[in-house]
Image (tube, rainbow, N blue to C red):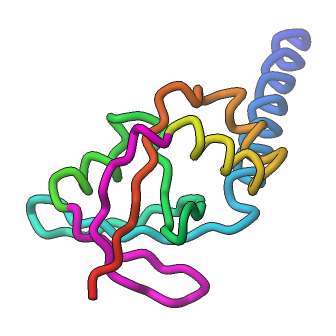
Amino acid sequence: MKSIIKVLATVVAVMLVWYMAQLIASETGEVVILTTTNSAGDTAETRLWVFEHEGLQYLRAGYADSGWYKKLLSDPSVSVTRNEVSLSYTAIPAPELRDLGNQIMRDKYGWRDSYISLFFSRDTTIPVRLDPIN
């Protein structure tokens, strides 16, 4: 019985360390808040990393089935809060920038991006360009 408890305690400890490391990695560095709207008009906030390329801001979806990504496909009018300032944008998928976006993210977020990529492939990412709404 003691060996089962030790094994369970070890599994729980490993899972807790993994969860905390992932939380620290994903929530440090620059994080913005994306606000999307679903078909019923309900809004949702998602915390994401952001990168810049040629004067524009981009987000990066991990995969096409990501909830926030599917919402912005339905309604590309989004709001992004960055440095406590909220602005409105039209979100445009830019899959042609996958490799460049991944490199920019790796350069900007360093070990955090490397750590997260151990669990989530960068082969399916989709950069999303944020076009300002005037």
Residue 76: percent from left, percent from top = 22, 62
Magenta: predominant secondary structure element? Answer: strand
134 left or right, relative to 56:
left
* Magenta-drawn segment: 76-97
Which residue: 48% across, 80% down? 81
| Most foreground residue, 19 or 78 | 78
- Image quadrant for the C terminus? bottom left
Residue 72's image quarter?
bottom left
| Most foreground residue, 127 or 4 | 127
- As displayed, is residue 80 above or below residue 5? below
Residue 114: percent from left, percent from top = 77, 37
- As displayed, is residue 109 above or below residue 32? above
Which residue: 49% across, 68% down? 56
Residue 8: percent from left, percent from top = 78, 20
67 left or right, relative to 17:
left
Which residue: 75% across, 62% down? 28
Residue 4: percent from left, percent from top = 82, 11
